[in-house]
Image (spheres, rainbow, N blue to C red):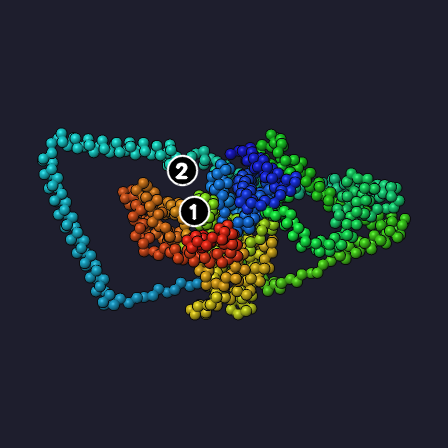
């Protein structure tokens, strides 16, 4: 694809964005919506549309090589990501559920379920490539040192007893005799077969033999033709994949190579752009800087004289907070400027009084508003202004720009000059303001001493008001140590680990197609693994990957993944780290046991972990078996491990994590019932319930796992039946079974003996599935969490006051299914 194609993609994204901004920033504010369903439909439509823009901008940003365009796209891309997170947060608050079903919305917009998938921006890794390579080298160095220190254990010599020796000889002799017996039987069987064939050949005539051969051959050829016609029909109907499409075509390979080369060109163009910026700034400072300074001074002096002539006195110089001399350069008369400055002073004087009145009327105002306009409103956004600004830049600078001469898509010098000229002007204005403020004071001293005293006093007061209380800084326990030494120690103590090489897309799972239909029938659907994947991408990957998104997005500091063992909780933690290039710290109770003993040792350990996590962000702090930290009662066999060791100190550290710290705590648990619910939910602000895979997800998983492990999916393998009989089994169970069946020997036999569904039944039967009771217990536990309670309350409100026992039982299940 050429750069014009990606430019068109960029333009299309902005066309859609302009429509959304017109909806979200109307001339008149929208009235509150009383109908919750209609309001959620509006939110869901906006969410889906922003996700489409997100996909387009991510693709354009990844492939466009023009450095100035990429900066504009990046600004809007971060804004769109933030807006998607805001809308998701608003949907959660309005629907009291972490999972949402929008199959009706994508049907109306003529989209497929794949269009709802949250893309992971490739720049998360590409732009941190050097940092990640340095970290890999550090890991390799530390691990090599650890291997060198650990001496291999000497081989243990086992003495062979007389009884054991006799047993080995007996086994070998019996095996030899068995092989000889099998050889004799084989020869006897072959002789009997030869005799039988000789008799048949004597009895059969030449014509009969020819007819027999014809039958076999015609049957074989007809079956082959029928099979080919059947395959062609299935391909034509779209029920099977064309074999030509199973591997990339030459044109696709060319496109992939072009995309790779474009990333290389991006780096070259970026380096040229940065060099040009430094040279342009130097040139502007040297050539245009002195002229700007003199022009500003002359204009300010002229303003002094005009104000003196018009008002009879010299004006007050605008403060730096108000914009300094930038106010003077506006096209206004001296009288208008004097009036504006006087109005500002009056406003500042009346601020306190207004504040008091507002505080007094705050509660009354709220009740009046609620009475006058009840209904649901959109929450204020921190990103809409950024999106509007980015869209305006695109419209004014790039939409109709003629780039016929810039075929190589390198930077444009004139745009750099325009941008940097403004920055240098601001820089010079500050210097000029300091000089002219002093000059104005001298003029006033010479003409009017009283006014000069007032202005000085006012300035002093303002400066005094700026000074605030200094916050106490936490004591740095490792101020004398380098970050490299701390990193090395944490790796040695196995508190900092390498993440497994898995991506979020490897967490297989199909879309839930009946979510909206079930909810309309008052049945709470179980989320699919596709929904889990999207929620993890929104809450963990996007905020950790982009600093700009993390700072202004709805804050999520700690996430808890709850589900039966084997549903992929640990895999999701590793996938978050791989997608964002984050460090993985392991503070699981079992991993921490015995390390850094005592209270001071615990403080040092937590200090080191979170210091390295902040300085080498983004970082993920994983707490496996998170329920152990909040045990109701510690079991006897775990008392020595002290699993509740982090219970007091870790919540304090969580509070100290600020907006600019890209640090996320992720807990995983399969037994949340044994933890204190209140403190558990207080620590983990987001609780994500992961179910066992549904039929569609199991079907996809069997297919992909078999292919991944060297197997072949043929018509002999009934995947539908296999997915049906594996109901209740988790992804971990399925991986175990596939590994057990697809041995090296079985893979070699696939050409003669294709895989069948019955082969997988026996290994599955040896594993205990996730029973209905366990899943119901997890649902009921979730119903007791803050969000679960709200969902139950909202559901019971919809159902009314009916007390039918059957309906009540069904409703109980429904509430638990969140």
Q: Residue at x 60, y 37 (%)?
A: 18
Left of 341 or right of it: where is 527? left
Residue in view at x 77 percent, y 57 percent: 464
Task: Report whether residue 731 is seen.
Answer: yes
Measured in 3D between alpha carbons, the distance from the residue under mark 2 to the one under mark 1, in whole angstroms, is 23 Å
Q: Could you say which is closer to the camera, residue 745 or residue 791?
A: 791
Name the disc covering residue 247, or none.
2
Note whether residue 497 is visible: no
Residue 82 point in image, percent of width and height: 58, 46
Q: Position of residue 74 (x, y in %)?
A: 59, 42
| Residue drawn 83% across the image and 42% down it | 335
Foreground tag (2 vs 1): 1
Q: Helix, strand or loop at disc 1?
A: loop
Residue 767 is marked as none
- Label at residue 509: 1
Left or right of 397 in this view: 99: left
């Amino acid at each position: 694809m050429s750069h014009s194609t990606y430019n068109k993609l960029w333009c299309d994204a902005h066309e859609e964005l302009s429509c959304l901004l017109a909806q979200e920033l109307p001339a008149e504010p929208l009235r509150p919506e009383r109908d919750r369903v209609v309001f959620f439909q509006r939110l869901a439509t906006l969410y889906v549309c922003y996700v489409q823009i997100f996909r387009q901008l991510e693709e354009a940003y990844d492939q466009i090589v023009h450095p100035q365009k990429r900066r504009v796209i990046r600004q809007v891309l971060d804004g769109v990501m933030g807006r998607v997170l805001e809308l998701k947060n608003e949907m959660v608050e309005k629907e009291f559920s972490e999972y949402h079903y929008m199959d009706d919305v994508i049907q109306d917009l003529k989209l497929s379920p794949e269009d709802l998938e949250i893309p992971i921006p490739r720049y998360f890794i590409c732009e941190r490539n050097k940092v990640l390579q340095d970290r890999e080298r550090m890991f390799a160095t530390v691990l090599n040192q650890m291997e060198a220190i650990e001496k291999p254990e000497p081989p243990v010599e086992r003495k062979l007893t007389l009884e054991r020796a006799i047993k080995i000889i007996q086994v070998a002799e019996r095996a030899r005799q068995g092989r000889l017996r099998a050889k004799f039987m084989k020869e006897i069987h072959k002789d009997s077969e030869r005799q039988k064939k000789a008799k048949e050949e004597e009895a059969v005539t030449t014509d009969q033999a020819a007819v027999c051969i014809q039958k076999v051959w015609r049957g074989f050829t007809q079956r082959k033709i029928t099979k080919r016609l059947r395959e062609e029909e299935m391909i034509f109907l779209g029920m099977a994949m064309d074999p030509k499409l199973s591997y990339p075509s030459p044109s696709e390979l060319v496109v992939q190579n072009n995309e790779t080369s474009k990333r290389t060109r991006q780096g070259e163009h970026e380096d040229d752009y940065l060099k040009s910026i430094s040279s342009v700034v130097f040139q502007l400072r040297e050539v245009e800087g002195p002229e700007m300074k003199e022009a500003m001074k002359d204009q300010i002096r002229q303003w002094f004289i005009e104000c003196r002539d018009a008002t009879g006195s010299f004006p007050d110089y605008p403060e730096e907070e108000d914009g300094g001399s930038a106010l003077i350069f506006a096209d206004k008369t001296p009288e208008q400027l004097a009036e504006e400055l006087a109005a500002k002073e009056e406003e500042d004087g009346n601020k306190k009084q207004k504040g008091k009145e507002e505080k007094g009327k705050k509660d009354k105002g709220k009740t009046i508003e609620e009475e006058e306009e009840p209904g649901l409103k959109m929450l204020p956004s921190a990103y809409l202004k950024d999106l509007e600004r980015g869209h305006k830049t695109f419209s004014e600078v790039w939409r109709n720009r003629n780039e016929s001469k810039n075929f190589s898509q390198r930077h444009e010098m004139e745009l750099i000059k325009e941008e940097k000229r403004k920055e240098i002007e601001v820089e010079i204005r500050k210097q000029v303001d300091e000089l002219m403020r002093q000059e104005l004071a001298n003029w006033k001293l010479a003409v009017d001493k009283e006014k000069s005293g007032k202005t000085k006093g006012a300035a002093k007061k303002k400066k005094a008001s700026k000074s605030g209380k200094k916050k106490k800084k936490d004591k740095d326990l490792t101020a004398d140590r380098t970050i490299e030494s701390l990193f090395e120690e944490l790796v040695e103590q196995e508190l900092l680990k390498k993440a497994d090489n898995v991506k979020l897309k490897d967490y297989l799972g199909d879309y839930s197609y009946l979510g909206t239909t079930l909810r309309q029938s008052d049945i709470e659907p179980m989320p699919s693994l596709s929904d889990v994947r999207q929620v993890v991408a929104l809450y963990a990957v996007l905020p950790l990957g982009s600093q700009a998104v993390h700072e202004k997005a709805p804050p999520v500091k700690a996430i808890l993944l709850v589900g039966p063992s084997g549903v992929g909780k640990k895999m999701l933690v590793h996938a978050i780290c791989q997608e964002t290039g984050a460090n993985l710290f392991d503070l699981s109770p079992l991993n921490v046991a015995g390390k850094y003993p005592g209270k001071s040792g615990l403080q040092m350990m937590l200090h080191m972990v979170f210091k390295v996590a902040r300085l080498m962000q983004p970082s993920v702090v994983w707490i496996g078996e998170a329920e152990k930290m909040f045990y109701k009662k510690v079991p006897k066999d775990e008392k020595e491990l002290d699993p509740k060791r982090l219970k007091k100190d870790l919540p304090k550290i969580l509070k100290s994590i600020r907006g600019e710290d890209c640090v996320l705590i992720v807990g995983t648990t399969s037994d949340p019932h044994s933890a204190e619910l209140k403190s558990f939910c207080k620590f983990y602000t987001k609780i994500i319930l992961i179910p066992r895979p549904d039929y569609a997800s199991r079907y996809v998983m069997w297919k992909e796992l078999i292919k991944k492990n060297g197997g072949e999916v043929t018509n002999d393998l009934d995947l539908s039946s296999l997915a049906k009989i594996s109901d209740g089994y988790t992804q971990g169970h399925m991986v175990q079974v596939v590994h057990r069946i697809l041995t090296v020997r079985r893979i070699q036999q696939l050409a003669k003996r294709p895989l069948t569904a019955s082969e997988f039944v026996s290994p599955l039967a040896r594993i205990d599935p996730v029973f209905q009771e366990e899943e119901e217990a997890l649902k009921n536990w979730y119903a007791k969490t803050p969000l679960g309670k709200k969902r139950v309350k909202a559901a019971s409100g919809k159902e009314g006051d009916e007390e039918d026992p059957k309906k009540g039982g069904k409703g109980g299940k429904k509430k638990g299914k969140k």
